[in-house]
C-alpha cells in the first residue's frame, strides 16, 4: 500500500468539507454554466473517477469524493469569465475558497497548469488526476493527448513562443500520463470507451 503524504488520511477525510454531487450541480446552475461546458465537466468527471478508482485499487491514497467535486467544478468560472475576461481557474478557486471548499479550490486552481512538476517523485494527488482528465476531454469527447494538443496548437499556437509553450506542456502531460498508468492495468486508449457513456 502506497502512502501519499500529500493526500488525505482517514481522519482528515472525516474533517474534509466537500460539496455533494447535488450541490455541485446547483453551483453549476447558479453560475450559469453553459450546456456544452456542463457536458464537458461530466465527461471529465467520468475520466477522473475511472482513473481515481483504479489508482485507489492499486494502493494510492486518493479521496474519490474530492476528485469528483474537483472534476465537476473545474470549469465553474468558465462561463462568467467569458464575459469578464478573467482567468477562469483563478476565478473559480477564489469562489470555492469563499464558499468553504479550499481543497476543491486547489484542484480548480491547478486544472490548467499544475503547480508541481509531473516528473517529481511526489505521489499522485487528486489535483493531478483531475488535471490529466481535463486534458483528455476535447469539448465533450474523450481523446488521446495527441488530438487534444493538436487542437490546442491550432487554436492558441499563433506565435512561435505560444507553439513552444504548448509543445513543452504536451511533454509534461506525457510524463504525467506515464506516471498515472504505470501502476494500472488500464492504458490511455482504454479511456476512449467512455465516449459510449452519457450518464450524468
Image: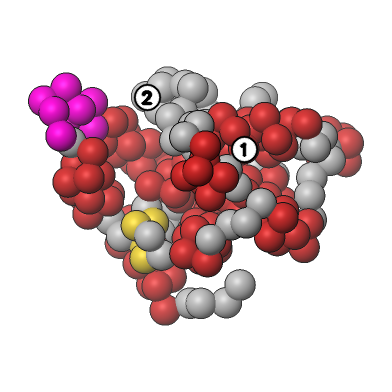
Q: Is residue 22 left or right of residue 184?
A: right
Q: Which residue is mark 2?
A: 119
Asked which quadrant contains residue 62, the reply is top right
Residue furthest to the front in view is 83
- Identify whether 173 is placed above or below 23: above
- The answer to whether any part of residue 34 appears in the image is yes
Q: What x and y, as percent, mark residue 64?
A: 67, 50
Q: Is residue 25 left or right of residue 147?
A: right
Which one is nearer the viewer's eye here, 2 or 176?
A: 176
Contact between labelled residues 1 and 2, with CB atoms less than 8 Å apart: no
At label 2, counting other C-alpha atoms closer than 10 Å, the crowd grade (few under 14, some 14-19, many 20 or more) is: few
Tell whether position 172 is magenta.
no
Instruction: From the image, give the main secondary structure of the stretch colored magenta.
Output: helix
- Find numbered disc 2 in the image and state the secondary structure of the residue it sits on: loop
**Residue placed under numbered mark 1 in the picture:** 92
Asked whether, in this view, residue 110 is left or right of residue 132, the answer is: right
What residue sits 58% from the left and 57% below the top? 33
Magenta highlight range: 158-166
Amino acid at each position: 500500500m502506497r502512502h501519499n503524504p500529500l493526500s488525505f488520511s482517514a481522519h482528515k477525510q472525516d474533517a474534509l468539507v466537500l460539496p455533494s454531487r447535488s450541490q455541485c450541480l446547483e453551483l453549476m446552475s447558479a453560475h450559469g454554466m453553459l450546456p456544452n461546458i456542463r457536458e464537458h465537466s461530466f465527461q471529465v468527471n467520468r475520466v477522473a473517477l475511472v482513473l481515481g478508482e483504479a489508482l485507489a485499487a492499486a494502493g494510492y491514497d486518493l479521496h474519490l469524493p474530492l476528485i469528483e467535486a474537483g472534476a465537476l467544478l473545474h470549469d465553474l468560472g468558465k462561463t462568467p469569465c467569458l464575459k469578464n475576461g478573467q482567468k477562469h481557474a483563478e476565478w473559480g478557486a477564489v469562489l470555492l475558497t469563499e464558499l468553504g471548499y479550499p481543497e476543491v479550490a486547489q484542484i480548480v486552481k491547478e486544472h490548467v497548469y499544475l503547480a508541481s512538476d509531473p516528473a517529481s517523485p511526489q505521489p499522485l494527488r487528486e489535483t493531478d488526476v483531475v488535471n490529466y482528465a481535463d486534458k483528455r476531454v476535447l469539448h465533450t469527447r474523450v481523446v488521446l493527448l495527441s488530438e487534444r494538443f493538436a487542437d490546442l496548437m491550432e487554436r492558441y499556437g499563433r506565435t512561435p513562443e505560444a507553439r513552444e509553450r504548448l509543445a513543452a506542456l504536451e511533454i509534461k502531460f506525457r510524463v504525467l500520463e506515464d506516471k498515472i498508468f504505470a501502476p494500472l492495468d488500464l492504458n490511455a486508449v482504454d479511456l476512449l470507451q467512455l465516449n459510449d457513456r452519457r450518464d450524468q
